[in-house]
């Protein structure tokens, strides 16, 4: 794991997560995607998935894995967002992206994804960013397309029956691979 010093971007500070951050990050991620609290933002999955989005073990694995970083975004010392970055050769994987629901829709996501892209280009020399998005999340996919990501049509089945990923409320879920060329950025 890289241990770069925190970077300040206006009022925001970006730093690598530590084991001490795990409880707060689980709460943040859950609040952005599941349950009633997630409905305050626009990234909720509450209509398609019940149950958990992640758990302490899942977050800790991202924090501790070689070639992986969990970027914490803070304002005034409070975690308000996070994203996973994983080194995969010439590409990097972007995942576990969460912004506090009440802060969504104000441009914060654009700043964070731009910082994530800069980070993987500078730290790992990544030339592409990959992510997977639940294919029925058209509004979210459109948001990523406006950031330069393209749909590949490559689908991975949703892990039905594995409640670590949530309890599906519909039977047509799959993950679609989105890719952005970072050489052109």
Image (cartoon, helix red, strand yellow):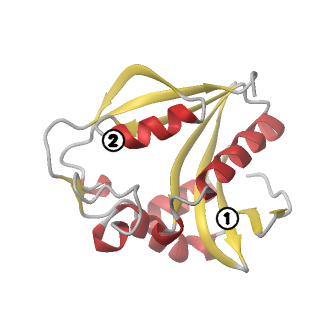
* Camera-nearest residue between 81 and 163: 81
Give the mark, 1 or 2, whose residue is nearer the N terminus: 1
Residue 34 percent coordinates (x, y)? 32, 64
Disc 1 is placed on an element classified as strand
Query: Which residue is rendered at x = 24% and y = 50% of the image?
Result: 162
Residue 108 percent coordinates (x, y)? 62, 58
Observer able to see residue 69: no
Q: Quadrant of residue 52?
A: bottom left
Number of disc labels:
2
Q: Is residue 178 above or below residue 24?
A: above
Between disc 1 and disc 2, the foreground one is 2
Query: Which residue is rendered at x = 42% and y = 43% of the image?
Result: 140
Query: Which residue is rendered at x = 24% and y = 55% of the image?
Result: 49
Label annotation for residue 137: 2
Q: Quadrant of residue 16?
A: bottom right
Query: Which residue is rendered at x = 57% and y = 42% of the image?
Result: 94
* Camera-nearest residue between 23 and 105: 105
Residue on which the image places disc 1: 73
Residue 37 percent coordinates (x, y)? 35, 73
Q: Is residue 145 above or below residue 119?
A: above
In the image, is 47 to the left or to the right of 14?
left
Label annotation for residue 138: none
Q: Quadrant of the C terminus?
A: top right
Residue at mark 1 to residue at mark 2: CA–CA distance: 24 Å
Observer able to see residue 177: yes
Disc 2 is placed on an element classified as loop
């Amino acid at each position: 794991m890289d241990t770069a010093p925190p970077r300040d971007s206006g009022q925001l500070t970006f730093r690598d997560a530590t084991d001490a951050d795990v409880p707060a990050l689980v709460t943040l991620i859950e609040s952005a995607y599941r349950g009633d609290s997630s409905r305050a933002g626009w990234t909720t999955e509450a209509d398609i998935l019940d149950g958990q989005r992640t758990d302490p073990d899942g977050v800790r694995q991202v924090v501790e894995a070689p070639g992986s970083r969990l970027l914490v975004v803070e304002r005034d010392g409070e975690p308000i967002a996070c994203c996973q970055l994983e080194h995969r050769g010439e590409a990097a994987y972007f995942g576990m992206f969460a912004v506090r629901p009440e802060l969504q829709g104000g441009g914060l996501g654009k700043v964070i994804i731009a910082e994530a892209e800069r980070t993987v280009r500078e730290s790992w020399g990544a030339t592409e960013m990959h992510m997977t998005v639940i294919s029925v999340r058209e509004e979210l996919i459109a948001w990523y397309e406006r950031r330069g990501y393209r749909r590949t049509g490559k689908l991975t089945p949703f892990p039905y029956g594995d409640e670590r990923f949530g309890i599906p409320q519909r039977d047509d879920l799959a993950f679609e691979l989105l890719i952005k060329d970072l050489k052109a950025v």
